[in-house]
Amino acid sequence: GRAVDSVELPDRRKLLWPFFYDLFSRYEELSQWRVVQADPLRLRVELVIPHDDVALMKQIETHLRKALPGEMSVKLERMAAIPASPGEKVRMVISLIGSSIRI
C-alpha cells in the first residue's frame, strides 16, 4: 500500500488501513470514518455518527487506545460528513507525514 494509506508508529512499524477497518466495522452506528496522522505520535479520528452519542465516542476511543501504543495521542472528532476531494474517493487513512520519516 501507499504510505498515505498507513499510519507510522513511533517504532517505525506501519498500521495499514485494514487494521482500522476491522476496528471500526464493529460499530453499526458509525457510517463513515477517517484516520489522519499529523505526526508520529498523534492521530485525529473523524467519525460520522447519527447523533452526539458520547458513550459511543468513549467506547471507540477506549478501543483505539487499547489497540495503539501508549505514547500515541488520539483525538476523536464527530463530523456531519467526510468529504472527498474532487475526483477522488474518500481515503480512510491519511498520513500527513507519509514516508518522510527515515532512519
Image (cartoon, rainbow, N blue to C red):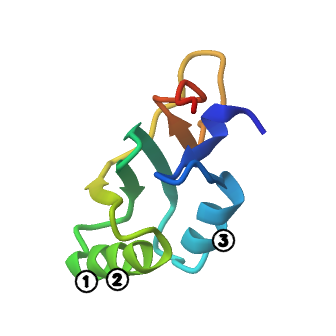
CB atoms at circles 3 and 2 under 8 Å apart? no
CB atoms at circles 1 and 2 under 8 Å apart? yes
Q: Does label 1 or label 3 sit earlier along the sequence?
A: 3
Residue at 28% x, 67% y is 51
In the rendered image, the vertical position of residue 4 relative to residue 61, given as above or below: above
Q: Is residue 77 left or right of residue 26?
A: left
Give the residue at the far top of this rendering.
86
In the rendered image, the vertical position of residue 24 relative to residue 78, given as above or below: below
Residue at mark 1? 55
In the rendered image, the vertical position of residue 31 relative to residue 12, given as above or below: below
Residue 48 in the image, given as x and y percentages of width and height: 40, 56
Residue 96 in the image, given as x and y percentages of width and height: 46, 29
Q: Give amino acid for label 1.
A: Ala
Image quarter (top left, top right, bottom left or bottom right) of the C terminus? top right
Q: Give amino acid for label 3.
A: Asp
Q: Give amino acid for label 2.
A: Gln
Residue 81 in the image, given as x and y percentages of width and height: 40, 44
Q: Which of 101 and 19 is in front in this view?
A: 101
- Crowd tier of the residue under label 1, counting other residues whose Cα lies within 10 Å: few below 14, some 14–19, many 20 or above: few
Residue at mark 3? 22
Q: Nearer the viewer, mark 1 or mark 3?
A: 3
Q: In this view, does 39 lie to the left or right of 103?
A: left
